[in-house]
Image: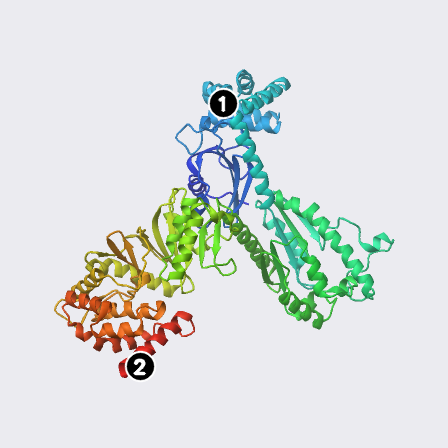
Amino acid sequence: MQPPDKDGLLAVIALVGETVRVVQPPSDWEKATGGNDVDCVVSELDAMWPLRLPPPWRLCGIRHYGSRSWQWVVENQGDVVILDTTDDPKGLRRCSIPTDLLLDGPGPLADPAARAAYLTEKRLLKGSDQARDWRHIGDLAGHDAIKYRSILSTAFGDTGRAIADRALQGSPPTASMWRQMTRAKLSRRLRSPIDTVTAATRETARILERMSRPSGLFVLIAGPDGTGKSTLASELREACEGLFRREKHFHWKPGLIPRPGALLGREALDPTQPHSHASHPKQLSVGVLVYHWLDFWLGGWIRIWPQRMRAGLVVMERGWWDFAVDPRRYRLQVSPRLVQFLGKWLPRPDLTLVLEASPEVLLARKAEISATELARQMKAWRKMPPPGRRHVYLDAAQSLDDMIGKAREEVVRGMEERALSSLGFGWSQLPRRSSPRWSLPRGPAATSRAALLIYQPVTLRGRAGWELARAAAAVGGFRLFPRGSAPPPEVRSALARHLLPGSAVAVARANRAGRYVALVMDDHGSPYAVAKVATDERDRRALEKEAEGLEHIAKLLGEPLSAPRILDRHQGILLLEAVPWSPRARPWTLPEEVAWALGEFFRAGAPGDDRRGAAHGDFAPWNLLRSGRRWVLLDWEEASRDEPAFFDILHYLVQSHSLLGRPSLRSLMEGIAGKGSVGRVILAYADAAGLDPRDAGGFLTPYLRQTEARFNPNARDGRAALAARGRLREQLSG
């Protein structure tokens, strides 16, 4: 595994915090130990910094191994780097040297004296007395011996100065110095009761965090005979080098207790003839199954769970669920339902890789069972996949290299999703995790509350739920929600270059697949940008059209109407300035001042032509925000300078009637005739546009025909819009 480009890695390191210094670089930067690990000291570490990782960098793991120390496993197209970061300005935990003492220098590499001091602490912590290590420390410290002594004496007093003198000679400290340094560390940590309690609380929280969110991975590889499970299991561990601290491979089960036959002194049966032996009687089969279940249950807690907690990779072939798919292999006559019931109490895989291929391909590799049985087993794995986070089906007929590459990608993807979801307070997915529309930060409270601004309520029910959610978020209620996935990768990739340190992101899925809206907030929870993200070519063209509408058509707007300001635009993303807004009690009611400004906008689009002019094209209650005394108009992808008169005002009224039920059909028809509040709105628009308000009714029927094609009859809102247009046509024809 080759180390990544130095400049690219330095750019990533700079994202970690306000000030970052490398105190132990990778071994390829200089002739020293270190491998591909990079040790850094940080001031004001940004817990959300991986959101700003530029593609193709990916976060694959977070290991919180000290109350003030974190390891970040990042990957770049197969190259893995571990960033070991410490932010401990008081030096009360693992690194006893206050990190503020190590941050001097122009960076990004700490000056030699600071690096020597850090390595001294690290070698003392590990109990290393190897001459090579201490000669390297002496060489570094020799660049500025005075500063080196000063750092160690500040951290450890007189013992630190004595250790420094030995290290400057390239020699390790004596045994008595080691003991004195340990006492000095303990004394510093106990000097302040408040600091001691704070550190103990952090350490307890860290341990609970590691127990609840293990950083290792449990991978189950399943499938019929001949699919290459054993080969993939062996090769996958090598392919994932660097991603994990340790690996463990189980063939079939943990093997904590002996197999049932061994208890009776029987030899193991020939595995190459799995279906050639008679099955146990049904009652005995149940007993044997329970015995195996005990092995899986005990082994899960004793052999698998500790590996996952300690950043290990556990690869198991077949696993418990093979009993349900192929009970004859184990000479059992048991119900799949019993296997499923018992399996609910076992540790679940983080990732299940099910290998499959045509029976002909598998028989060419292993002719142990019939083609019919192979086909049945593959169907069974599809019908009843093992419970767990993710299931992936791999084509076992492809080349081994391709299969290993795809399996590794699934491992990396699963680790990335889990690591990102654990950043900071994480995200909640609403209304439900299985099909979320919104992904909202769980905290801090100010951020959670601000995140709800991504949704504008336009119904009474929506407003009530929105206000209730805002109240709950204000007191930290979102932290009670389970952690969901991080925002989708396409959104993260598009936003990475636009995020400030400490930024939080809320994401809403748009009505069309592949479209997202993201609200970006700073570290105080104040929104500063809204991003529209498109993932396919059609939607990218729509974003380009919206940008053009904002740049060329929205400028025709007059007070009190305005449009969001474009902050940036490039392929697949349109970044807009976040606008402060407040909800409206009656969003279906259009203020007359807004109708007047809309009429002026129409006339500005085509001076001298009273039949066609400028229009927003999708002027509706949910696209109009009240911002103090201003009104901000959103979603400009339908904007045009060549739309029929009254288009925008009719669209607002008809859409509001269709989807909000206000105004009523009667009020709408009376308004077209110039009566009531609807009539006053039409009059204001017509006066500003230089039109006769009595002509509005003549434009309604063409408007209805023109907009019908916009709506999907298979969607609920689409059906409502079409039904409302049908009722309006009936009224007009009658």
Residue at numbered disc 2 = 730
Left or right for 704, reference 68:
left
Badge nearest the viewer, 1 or 2: 2
Residue 579 position in % (x across, y down) = 30, 51
Q: In front here: 432 or 665? A: 665
Residue at numbered disc 1 = 141
Residue 487 position in % (x across, y down) = 45, 53
Q: In front here: 52 or 140? A: 52
Q: How many marks?
A: 2
- Does residue 489 appear in this view? yes
Decide: few, some or many residues near mark 1? Use Cα within 10 Å; few <14, some 14-19, many ≥20: many
Q: In front here: 44 or 725? A: 725
At label 2, the amino acid type is Glu
Quarter of the figure that contains the N terminus? top right
Left or right for 726, reference 434:
left
- Does residue 279 appear in this view? no
Q: Earlier in the sequence, mark 1 or mark 2?
A: 1
